[in-house]
Image: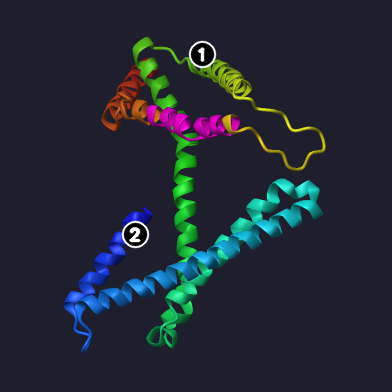
Amino acid sequence: MTVASVLAAWVFVLTDATQRSFGNASVSRHVAASFALYTVAGAAVGLAASAIAYLAQALAKRLENRYPRFAAFAGPAVYAAVASLASSGTAFWTFSGARVRATLLGNVGPWLFVLGIALTVAALAGVGVSAAYTLPDSMFADVIEWDELRTRRRQEGIFYGIRNLIRKLTGALVIFTTLQLLGRSGYASPPEGTLQFTQTDSALQTIRLLVSPFGATILCGAILLAWLFPLSREKYTRIQKLLEQRRARLAE
């Protein structure tokens, strides 16, 4: 992504140099000046980012030492505050131009920018989390009605009992497998009273594999199975109509 950003920036520079005239400055001089400007600006931004990261890490360690009970939350809280300040600073700098600053957009724009980013992140996170909790139960209810159409019996108790049993078995299997993999990787429990403890490289690598590619593979498999779910909206509507007709005949 960094390489793509640099290449895109240079494409804009070259396009600007060839499409506009800069007095006595040639295209080669314009490109050389842009290279020098980006080099200085990049070095300044890199130094500033390194300084901010160092200060944030120092502040997090100080909070961990002063408030041991909240040691696990000190680092994430400090980094979240730094990220929020950086986003807010970017928003206010974006709308700080001379023409925009005196308008309503210059006063409201930064706040709308920050609010838009927050709402976008919340919406993206909410869609994924809500889908994981609501879609399986909705699909499960459709399966129960399909089974009623085939067997002429309502068997919610059997279906939900089997589902809960499968959840318990898979949960136990996941916990057992995870603990076995962590044990084989050299994972060590922190001694009692220890505030900071570093795991071995193999244990850290195993944890990364479990929470990133392994979990993503399982999630992709679940998405594929949901995509292949045979009950479409049209089929479910037809099932409901057939069940209503059957219930109406039985009521007569």
- Calculate the distance from the C-alpha at mark 2 to the C-alpha at mark 1: 56 Å
Label 2: few (<14), some or many (≥20) within 10 Å? few
Badge 1 marks a residue whose secondary structure is helix
Q: Which residue is drawn at 68% across and 38% down?
A: 198
Q: Which residue is drawn at 69% across and 49% down?
A: 73
Badge 2 marks a residue whose secondary structure is helix
Q: Which residue is drawn at 37% across and 75% down?
A: 37
**Residue toward you, 106 or 67:** 67
**Residue toward you, 100 or 36:** 36
Q: Can residue 252 be seen in this view?
A: no
244 within the magenta span: no
Image coords of residue 108 (percent x, y) = 47, 77
Q: Is residue 21 left or right of residue 211?
A: left
| Disc with the residue nearer the chain's start (2 vs 1) | 2
Q: Mark 1 points at which residue?
A: 158
Which residue lies most toward the left here?
Answer: 19
- Marking on residue 173: none
**Residue toward you, 111 or 183:** 183
Q: Is residue 168 visible?
A: yes
Q: In this view, does 65 lie to the left or right of 123?
A: right
Q: Which amino acid does label 2 sit on?
A: Ser
Image coords of residue 16 (percent x, y) = 23, 75
The quarter of the picture where residue 217 lies is top left
Which residue lies most toward the top here?
Answer: 151
The stretch in magenta equals 203-221
